[in-house]
Structures are given as structure tokens and as C-alpha cells.
Image: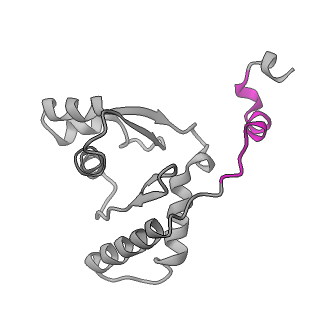
Amino acid sequence: MVYSPLEQWRGVRVTGQRTARHWAQTIRWLCDEVYAQAEKIVLVQDNLNTHTPASLYEAFAPHEALRLKERIEWHYTPKHGSWLNMAEIEIGAAQRQCLDRRIAEQETLEDELQQWARRRNAQQCGTDWRFTTADARIKLKRLYPSTLLD
């Protein structure tokens, strides 16, 4: 799941596994197809062990991995903080609206998820994000310097 909340756009890719190579292919898709004209792509993602620039080098030749790596501005959600990840909200929506039954073939799954994403994109479904800075200061108090909280 790739989600751009400011554009109210999501993209889905279906792979048989969640490997470093599959993730690297998704990064190349983002760089070369989705945001081909962008100079820099700001990527906020979870801390899954395959979601690192090193995975690009595992999947591609060094010059290609470097090209992709330099297009990305990397940001990771805090560990144990998946509640921050808006893509997780979109995954939940996909599960409720599209994946609420057994789908036997990967091809059918891909087709249905692509249709789901097109509908959500056409409707410009956004995220009703209610976590404010004040909420973050309470929830993440231990991460803020005490002078900011006084």
C-alpha cells in the first residue's frame, strides 16, 4: 500500500511475499512511474527490516540502487508507533471494503484491489486524522525535552 494523504491518492501492489526485492520493485515503481517527474520523493514508512535503502542494493545493480536511493527523502515512523502510519488506515479500509472474503487467485486479488484504489482515488477519500500536536505531546511526553512542555 502506498498512500499520499495530501493528494488523496493510494496505490496498491500485490506480491506473493514481503521480501526486500518486492519492496525495492515498489520503490522503483514509485520513482519511475508514479512520481517520474518529481525531483525528490518524501517517503514516510514503517520500520520493517526490508524497508531500507540496503534492499535496493539487494535487488538492483549498484548504479540503479543509488539512483533510486537518491530520489527518496527517508523518514521512518517511530518504533512501536504504527498508529502514526496513515497507510495502515488505508490497509484497514481495503480489508473492510474489498478483502472481507477469501480470494483464491492472485490475479483476481490484484484486479479487485486496483478497482478499489481507483474508486477511492476518484472519490478523493482522505484520512480523517485526529491526532494533534497537543495529543502527540501527551502521548510522546518522554520524547520531548521538558522545556517544551513547561
User: In the rendered view of the protein, which quadrant contains the N terminus?
Assistant: bottom left
Direction from residue 73 to residue 79 in the image, left or right: right
Image height of 123 relative to 127, above or below: below
Q: Residue furthest top?
A: 147
Image height of 47 relative to 33, above or below: above
131 part of magenta stretch = yes
* Residue 29 x %, y %: 25, 50
64 part of magenta stretch = no
Number of callouts in the render? 0
> Could you say which is closer to the camera, residue 8 or residue 16?
8
- Residue shown at 46% from the left, 43% from the top: 45
* Residue 62 x %, y %: 15, 30
- In magenta, the rendered stretch is 129-144
> Could you say which is closer to the camera, residue 106 or residue 12?
12
> Could you say which is closer to the camera, residue 137 or residue 31?
31
Q: Name which quarter of the figure residue 125 lies in.
A: bottom right
Q: Name which quarter of the figure residue 136 lies in.
A: top right
- Residue shown at 37% from the left, 82% from the top: 103
* Residue 7 x %, y %: 47, 52
Q: Name which quarter of the figure residue 49 lies in.
A: top left
Direction from residue 46 to residue 21 in the image, left or right: left
- Residue shown at 42% from the left, 83% from the top: 102
Dominant secondary structure of the residues highlighted in magenta in the image: helix
Direction from residue 40 to residue 96 in the image, left or right: right
